[in-house]
Amino acid sequence: MGVTILAIESSCDDTSAAVVKDGYILSNLIAGQDIHMSYGGVVPELASRAHQANIVPVADQALKKAGVRIDDIDAVAFTRGPGLLGSLLVGTSFAKGFALARNIPLIEVNHLHAHILAHFILERDRENRLPAFPFLCLLVSGGHTRIILLRSHFEMEILGNTIDDAAGEAFDKCGKLMDFPYPAGPIIDKLASEGNNKAFIFSKPSVKGLDFSFSGLKTSFLYFLRDRLKEDPDFIIKNKTDLCASLQETIISILMTKLIKASQLTGIKEIGIAGGVSANSGLRNYLSREGEKRGWNLFIPPLKYTTDNAAMIGITGYYKYLRGEFSNQDIVPQARF
Ligand code: KG4
Ligand code: ZN
């Protein structure tokens, strides 16, 4: 008969629902929230209100697109955290209500675990290459920057972590300084492809071991812009593409230096990237070049599984279902872990 799971993701500003059958994605719908663009970041209260408006239609569409009926669903998986509490509450309440009404198991999923297990998503119409263990994954999102060693789907060790801002925050905050709307990451990525990545040099942090730091880059970018704007008020407009290319190059180089070091220290060549920033084309190209040079077996997720999506919650929920890891109705969302 197989196992069919309805998965819900609502940790930040995307409302997503997916249907996963035996590890295969049958549907994965995402409703984004443009409302935050002009605020330079996600406004938590507006995000939870939009989730409330979107969650039922998105889940309904996910079921229809998958061609399954409500009583075909064997379990509901949902993001418990980390994320914005108000946003998580909407997805959690929906999942609990659905599970209670149908009398089926409820499965809590850690959002970060899900970003990584997105590498294990199966699709019907493509060749499914899955990582072998041990597997090194660089998780780069709006809230996290980590190098994680996976010994199995559930045994994970954090080898490196950011000591301040996340890589996605570096993109978004520096983009805000250039007056870009939120999220600035994809805009910088696009403009960078037309610029010279050696036009400007920004300082890189010296952090011990495999940890990262991005707050210094943001400050040096701020002072750099402030000084140049004094000389020429149109500096940003005139140098937009070169600024983006040089900034992106600096972020990628900080990330890649530590990933290469992690591979050398562990001897692991089974390597992947995950999270919103792993959509960055500069990072993907750099990684491919390095991977080829170093004989890495590389896993670069399809773009749709890099930023927040419920398919990754569904695949994680599927593996938890197989282990019988279910939650009770008294479960509550958790903003931080
Ligand atoms: O994983 P995600 O969707 O949400 C979190 O869990 O945080 O990641 C969102 C982050 C944002 O900071 C966004 O600017 C960044 O991913 N991002 C990118 C790109 N697409 C999304 N950063 C650089 N280049 C991109 N193409
Ligand atoms: Zn995420």
Image (tube, rainbow, N blue to C red):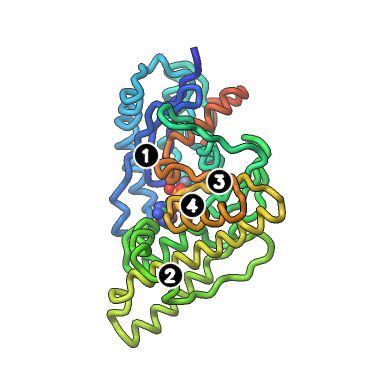
In the rendered structure, the answer to whether residue 106 lies left or right of residue 41 reads right
What residue is at 31 percent from the left and 28 percent from the top? 61
Alpha-carbon neighbours of circle 3 within 10 Å: few (<14), some, or many (≥20)?
A: some
What residue is at 38 percent from the left and 67 percent from the top? 244
> Mark 3 and mark 1: span between their CA atoms?
29 Å
Element at label 4: loop
Alpha-carbon neighbours of circle 1 within 10 Å: few (<14), some, or many (≥20)?
A: many
Which corner quadrant holds the C terminus? Answer: top right
The tag earlier along the polypeptide, 3 or 4, is: 4
> Mark 4 and mark 2: span between their CA atoms?
22 Å
The tag earlier along the polypeptide, 3 or 2, is: 2
Q: Which residue is mark 4?
A: 141
Mark 3 or 1, which is nearer the eye?
3
Q: Amino acid at mark 1?
A: Thr
Query: Which of the 4 image quadrants contains residue 257?
Result: bottom right
The residue at the far bottom in this view is: 231
Alpha-carbon neighbours of circle 2 within 10 Å: few (<14), some, or many (≥20)?
A: some
What residue is at 38 percent from the left and 53 percent from the top? 42
> Mark 1 and mark 2: span between their CA atoms?
35 Å
Find residue 119 and report its horizontal and vertical position in percent.
52, 38
Q: Which residue is mark 2?
A: 197
Q: Which residue is mark 1?
A: 15
Mark 1 or 4, which is nearer the eye?
4
The tag earlier along the polypeptide, 1 or 4, is: 1
Query: Which of the 4 image quadrants contains residue 183?
Result: bottom left
The tag earlier along the polypeptide, 3 or 1, is: 1
